[in-house]
Image (cartoon, helix red, strand yellow):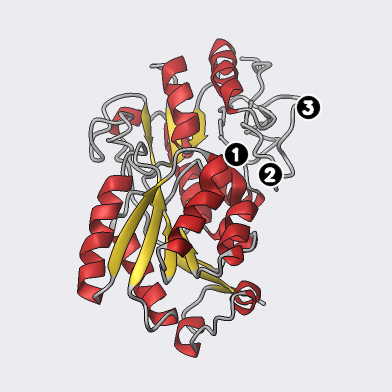
Amino acid sequence: MGRRDEKLYLPSSGHRDNGCRCAGSGTTAIENPPDRIFNCFLRFALAARIDAFRQGLRELGNLEGKNVVIEWRSAEGKPDRVPALAAELVRLKVAILVTGGPQSTRPAKEATSTIPIVMAFDNDPIGNGFVASLARPGGNITGLSTLAPELNGKQLELLKEIVPRLSLVAILGDSTIPGNMQALKEAELAAGALAVKIRYLDIQNPKDIDSVFRAASKERADAVLVLTSPVFNPYRAETAGFAVKHRLPTIYSTPEFVKDGGLMSYSMSFTDLYRRAAMYVAKILKGAKAADLPVEQPTKFELVINLKTAKQIGLTIPPSVLARADKVIK
C-alpha cells in the first residue's frame, strides 16, 4: 500500500510576543510524507512548551519529519481568525487537533465533533462544556486540565511569606472565565486561615489593566494575585510593568509573566502538560478514542522568582522562599 501524500498543520492565533520559532504562515515540504500524521492547533505557541511537546512525541517514537509532519500557521495576533483556521483544518480531514487553552479548544469544538481534540491545558473543561466528566469525557475532546483551585491558596501563602505584614490582597480576574469564581472562593478560604483580607477586582478588557492596578493601590492593597485570564495573557510585559509602577508585589499563574518582568509565579508546569499532551496523541494514533481517555490533572508545580523586579519595588525575598524556587531570574 503506498504512502498517503498528506501533511500536518498547526495554526496559532499568533500571540504578538510569541517566542516560538515555528509560528508563522509558511509551509514546509517533506519528501516521502509519513503514513500517519496528526494535526495540532494551538492558540499561541511558546517555544519552551512546543519543545516539550516535541520531546514528548520523540519519547513515544513519533519522529518529526519521519512519521510525524508538523506545519505551523498563525492568525497573526487576531483571535477572530482562529475559527476560520479550525474550519480549514477540518476540511483538510486532519487526524488530530491539539489545542492550547479554551480560546482555541472552543473554535476547534465548533468546527468538528468527530476529529479527536487533545487539550494541552484547560482551566475548567467541564465548566467550558468540553467534556462530560474528567473520568469519561464522552465526546471527541480529552487532554489536560489545569483546574486546581487550591493553587491560589498556596499563592497567598507565598505572598504572606514575602510580605510579612500582609493584610489586604487584591485579586484580579475575569468573572466570565469558568473556574475563576471557584478559584476565588478557595482563595477566600485560604485568606481566612492567614488572617488576610481579599478585595476582588473584575477586569474584562485589556485597556483596564492599568486601572485595576491603580484601584488596588488606591485601596492600599499590600499585594496582588492575578488569576488566569486571556485579558492579561497577551499583555504580560504591560501587566508586569503596571505592577512595578504601583509598587505592588504581584504573583501570577504562569511563569511567562515572570520572564516578562513579573515578580513571581507559582503554577503547574505548563511544559510538563505539553509533554503529557503528546501521550494522548500517541494513544489516539494507536487507535484509542478521546471519549475513553480520562482528562488528567497537573502533577508538577513550579515557583519562579524575578529578583530584578523585587529590587525595583524595594522588596527583599526571604532566603527560605528563594531556596524553594525552581528558577530565579537575577
The residue closer to the viewer here, 114 or 328, is 328
Q: Residues within 10 Å of mark 1 (few under 14, many from 20)?
A: many
Q: Badges 2 and 1: C-beta atoms under 8 Å apart? A: yes
Residue that label 2 marks: 18
Question: Which is nearer the N-term, disc 2 or disc 1?
Answer: 2
x, y percent for residue 151:
34, 61
Quadrant housing the N terminus: top right
The residue singled out by tag 1 in the image is 44
- Which circle, 2 or 3, is nearer the viewer? 2
Residue on which the image places disc 3: 26
- Amino acid beneath label 3: Gly
x and y percentages locating residue 83 in the rendered image: 54, 19
Name the mark on residue 13.
Answer: none
Which quadrant of the figure has residue 28?
top right
Identified at 66% across, 49% down, the residue is 47
- Establish if 314 lies above or below 260: below
Residues under labels 2 and 1: Cα distance? 7 Å
Indicate which label's residue lies in the foreground, 3 or 1: 1
Residue visible at 55% across and 81% down?
315
Residue 120 vs residue 279, the one in the foreground: 120
Q: Nearer the viewer, residue 49 or 126?
A: 126
Tag 1: residue type? Answer: Phe
Quadrant in the rendering for residue 13: top right
